[in-house]
Amino acid sequence: MKLLNKIYRPSIWEFAYWFFALIFIAIFLGHFHHEYQNTFLFSLMLMPVMVSFSYFLANFLIRELWQKGLRRKFWLYLFYGLVTATWFQLMAIMVFFISLAELQYKNMNPMMDDLSLLWVIQIMIATVFTVIIQLKRENQQQKAIQRLESDAFEMKMRLKELELNALKEQIHPHFLFNTLNNLYGLALEKSEKLPEALLRLSQLLDFLVYQSQKEYIPLGTELQLIQDYIALETLRFEERLESRIEISTKESQFRISPFLLFPLVENAFKHGLKPASGSTFLSVKAWMEKDSFQFEVINSLPEKPLQTKNGGLGLINLKQRLELHYPKNYQLSYRKTAEQFEVSLSIKIKENEQQPV
């Protein structure tokens, strides 16, 4: 069916090719005998056989046999095709020329003396046509592959964007739940620190509404969020929490995904630091090295820490986001002892991430 569609629905360039091939044969062979009109009619009568053999060569022998490695069948069917084409051309010569010439040799077309040359020329034209068809087909296949690769890349980017958005949306209720739970605890205690906590919460919500929807934000903005969050959580500990925050990234123009560092600090409060655990400590460090950003959180552990897998939902979410944002360009490590839990994050900086936001 594909072969038939190709034969009966040729493109414009194919019509042009065969038209110029006919003109070439008529002029080239007619030049020897100066019988251009008769040569043209003779070539025109033989054209259907030449065209049919060319399509047979291009669309069946090459595509269906040679390209599939069926070499023996290719040569066998090529021989059959040549024999069949020769037979049809001889029949055309007998019917249209010998009979029209009333079996008189002198009345026959002069091209009857050049049948071998005519056959060579037809083979050459069929070969050129096959080469053009094959090059055109390979070009179309290459374009189709490029389109598929482009579509696949675009789909991959869309899926990545959707996955990142889904992961980011998971953070918002997770963060709000923990923060509101802390406020609820202060309210039950009728703490005087509740107004300050609400103020801190309003600042965090401002970040949540206006900054978290961006793909990247300045590193300083993320670190300020962490400091506000620590200040909010510290209200519950009174004097029992010893916190140390060291940030050496003020001059950095590094950009980061919103809420990327936040789960590391939140995890320390949720799974490690407890107001009723006596003296506790928290250390947060952020600094820049030559080609990387470093972030470290160390927190004390209660005597009976909660048994959670890999730090809970926040850190699982963090790993997924790091893999999507910085594949093969980050290192996330944990170290847990009986007294403390340490987590370190290193992100390799690319040139485009060092530019101003």
Image (cartoon, helix red, strand yellow):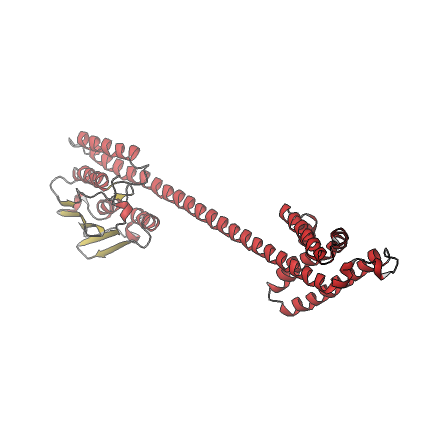
Tell me, yes or no, if residue 190 can be seen here.
no
Q: Is residue 145 left or right of residue 109?
A: left
Residue 230, quarter of the rendered image: top left
- In this view, which residue lies farthest toward the right? 102
Question: Quarter holding the C terminus?
Answer: top left
Relative image position of residue 283 (x, y in whole percent): 16, 48
Relative image position of residue 86 (x, y in whole percent): 75, 63
Residue at (16%, 47%) from the top-left corner? 282
Q: Is residue 296 left or right of residue 140?
A: left
Residue at (67%, 51%) from the top-left corner? 18
Residue at (65%, 66%) from the top-left corner? 74
Residue 237 sits above or below residue 315 on the image: above
Relative image position of residue 232 (x, y in whole percent): 19, 37
**How many numbered marks does the figure carry?**
0
Q: Is residue 49 left or right of residue 148?
A: right
Residue 164 sits above or below residue 189 on the image: below
Q: Nearer the viewer, residue 227 or 132?
A: 132
Q: Nearer the viewer, residue 307 or 286?
A: 286
Residue at (84%, 61%) from the top-left corner? 105
Residue 145 sits above or below residue 169 on the image: below
Relative image position of residue 236 (x, y in whole percent): 17, 38
- In this view, which residue lies farthest toward the left? 239
Tell me, yes or no, if residue 7 can be seen here.
yes
Residue 229 sits above or below residue 25 on the image: above
Q: Nearer the viewer, residue 235 or 55?
A: 55
Residue 212, quarter of the rendered image: top left
- In this view, which residue lies farthest toward the bottom? 72
Q: Is residue 146 left or right of residue 217?
A: right
